[in-house]
């Protein structure tokens, strides 16, 4: 039994013909880069920056972004090498299957289900903040019972708020689910347009806001530690773990491998270039936001609006920010809804999930059943859970996947050194070990509640694997 649990998959053929209609290859290098930026630039800038600064790092949230970027950079290099070796849509799940074995692959794949689903829910919850702010700006006020989650995360516990559910979050998720259902060309085209809009918005905010930055707001740069991840260096690390949530988009690009025209060339380009662009934009926006207002006031559902509204001279910018933020957050949700169904599809084609999850629509060439399931679950989570809980849970799943991929590159360099690699991780021992170490450092900065939820989720996943996946695994059947 142990041998089968550690069995590694070596055949990653791109031939889809055995599974019915194939995914449509429409994406080039800039389409892949746009997917990466679309997934990365969103809640990290428009919401999480404010919470991380106000509750954990203060103005040193810039250091939190740098730490998270370095950690992501190590992982991005490893993803780029794997993407040239295994150019299919399984991403971390497939990479772990090739290097760590079946049980580890299931564990990573199961965590990716949480990663993409919960991250999209978190972004949808934050989308509501800017949507209601825009409506308030127009004199339209929705009942708070329909714009707030019925649960809140307070002092490590979930408590009832008395609200009904987050209706705007549900609405945006279902609209984007429909778009992802009808085709990758349509959804990626809209994503590219939204990426142009939100990058332009960020540039405008940075340039316009820089004139009104008060350097006194950056002092003290690292506020005095108050314990439990609040300020000081522990707060910077807690902030890094939180804003790490903002960087996971580059991984989502690898789930579109089977819709790439030339995955060996385009995926490394898109993964690395999107990460560089987004890091620069994050640092610029974080510096301006913490310079416009004291960091203590940024813990709102729309911190960019909060910072801009504090300066009457920038009142003209508020409407642009609200509309641009909604567009930017929508693109993140869109890419997550694109990514999640493709993970399900690859897992089903390995026999780890029922065959229905591996089906592709004969006309739209999308994993349509998975897309509907994904959209429904994301909408449900966004409707009832608060943003801060969702963001932290997303970071945990992502950090585990990243550490597995970093370790996997080292393992394959040893077990399959002769495989052709069009991209190779530089300084492989340092990069991979630093990637694993930095991921674990961020993991252990999160609180016990996140670990408890991860434990419950893992037990549920292992139950599904041992009751279904292990029995139906095609790798197991071919070996017997």
Image (tube, helix red, strand yellow):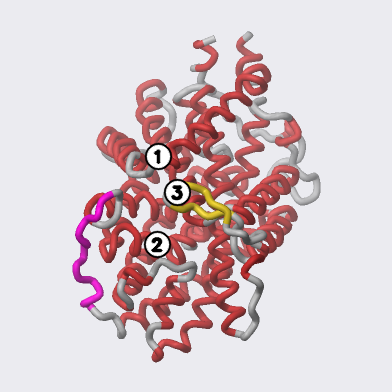
Residue range in magenta is 215-227
Q: Main secondary structure of the magenta part?
A: loop
Circle 2 — which element? helix
Give the numbered dot on residue 462: none
Residue at the spot 35% in from the left edge and 60% down from the top edge: 55
Would you say 201 lies left or right of 177 here?
left
Q: Which residue of the protein is positioned furthest toward the right in this rendering?
A: 363
The percent position of residue 187, horizontal first and vertical second, equals 65, 59
Q: Calculate the distance from the C-alpha at mark 3 to the C-alpha at mark 2.
A: 12 Å
Which quarter of the figure is the C terminus placed in? top right
Residue at the spot 67% in from the left edge and 63% down from the top edge: 167
Circle 1 — which element? helix
Pointer 1 local density, CA inside 10 Å: few below 14, some 14–19, many at least 20: few
Residue at the spot 61% in from the left edge and 43% down from the top edge: 258
Give the numbered dot on residue 392: 3
The percent position of residue 11, horizontal first and vertical second, equals 57, 25
Q: Calculate the distance from the C-alpha at mark 1 to the C-alpha at mark 3.
A: 11 Å
Where 311 sits versus 9, above or below? below
Read off the residue under disc 2: 51
Asked whether the viewer can see residue 60, the reply is yes
Where 203 sits versus 83, above or below? below
Asked whether the viewer can see residue 81, the reply is no
Mark 2 touches mark 1? (CB < 8 Å): no
Q: Nearer the viewer, residue 429 or 317?
A: 317
């Amino acid at each position: 039994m142990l041998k089968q649990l550690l069995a590694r998959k070596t055949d990653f053929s791109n031939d889809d013909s055995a599974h019915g209609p194939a995914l449509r290859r429409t994406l080039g290098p800039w389409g892949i880069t746009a997917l990466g930026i679309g997934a990365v630039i969103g809640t990290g800038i428009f919401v999480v920056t404010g919470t991380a600064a106000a509750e954990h790092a203060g103005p040193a949230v810039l250091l939190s972004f740098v730490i998270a970027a370095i950690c992501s950079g190590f992982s991005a290099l490893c993803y780029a090498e794997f993407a040239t070796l295994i150019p299919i849509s399984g991403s971390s799940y497939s990479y772990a299957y090739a290097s760590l074995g079946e049980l580890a692959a299931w564990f990573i794949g199961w965590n990716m289900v949480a990663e993409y689903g919960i991250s999209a829910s978190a972004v949808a919850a934050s989308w509501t903040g800017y949507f209601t702010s825009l409506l308030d700006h127009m004199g339209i006020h929705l009942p708070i019972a329909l714009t707030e989650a019925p649960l809140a995360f307070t002092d490590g516990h979930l408590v009832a708020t008395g609200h009904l559910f987050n209706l705007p979050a549900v609405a945006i998720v279902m609209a984007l689910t429909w778009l992802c259902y009808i085709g990758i060309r349509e959804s990626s085209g809209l994503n590219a347009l939204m990426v142009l809009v939100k990058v332009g918005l960020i540039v405008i905010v940075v340039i316009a806001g820089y004139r009104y930055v008060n350097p006194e707001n950056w002092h003290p740069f690292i506020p005095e530690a108050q314990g439990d991840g609040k300020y000081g260096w522990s707060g910077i690390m807690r902030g890094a773990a939180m804003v790490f949530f903002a960087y996971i988009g580059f991984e989502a690009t690898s789930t579109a491998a089977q819709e790439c025209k030339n995955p060996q060339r385009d995926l490394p380009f898109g993964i690395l270039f999107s990460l560089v662009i987004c890091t620069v934009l994050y640092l610029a926006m974080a510096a301006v936001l913490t310079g416009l207002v004291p960091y203590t006031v940024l813990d709102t559902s729309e911190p960019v609006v909060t910072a801009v509204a504090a300066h009457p001279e920038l009142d003209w910018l508020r409407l642009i920010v609200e509309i641009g933020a909604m567009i930017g957050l929508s693109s993140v949700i869109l890419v997550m809804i694109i990514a999640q169904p493709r993970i399900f599809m690859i897992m089903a084609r390995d026999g780890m999930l029922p065959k229905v999850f591996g089906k592709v629509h004969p006309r739209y060439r999308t994993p349509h059943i998975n897309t509907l399931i994904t959209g429904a679950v994301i909408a449900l989570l966004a409707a009832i859970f608060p943003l801060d809980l969702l963001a932290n849970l997303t970071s945990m799943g992502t950090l585990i996947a990243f550490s597995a991929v970093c370790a996997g590159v080292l393992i394959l360099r040893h077990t399959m050194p002769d495989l052709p690699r069009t991209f190779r991780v530089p300084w492989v021992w340092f990069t991979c070990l630093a990637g694993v170490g930095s991921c674990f450092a961020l993991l252990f900065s999160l609180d016990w509640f996140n670990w408890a939820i991860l434990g419950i989720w893992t037990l549920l996943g292992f139950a599904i694997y041992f009751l279904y996946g292990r029995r139906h695994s095609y790798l197991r059947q071919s070996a017997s």
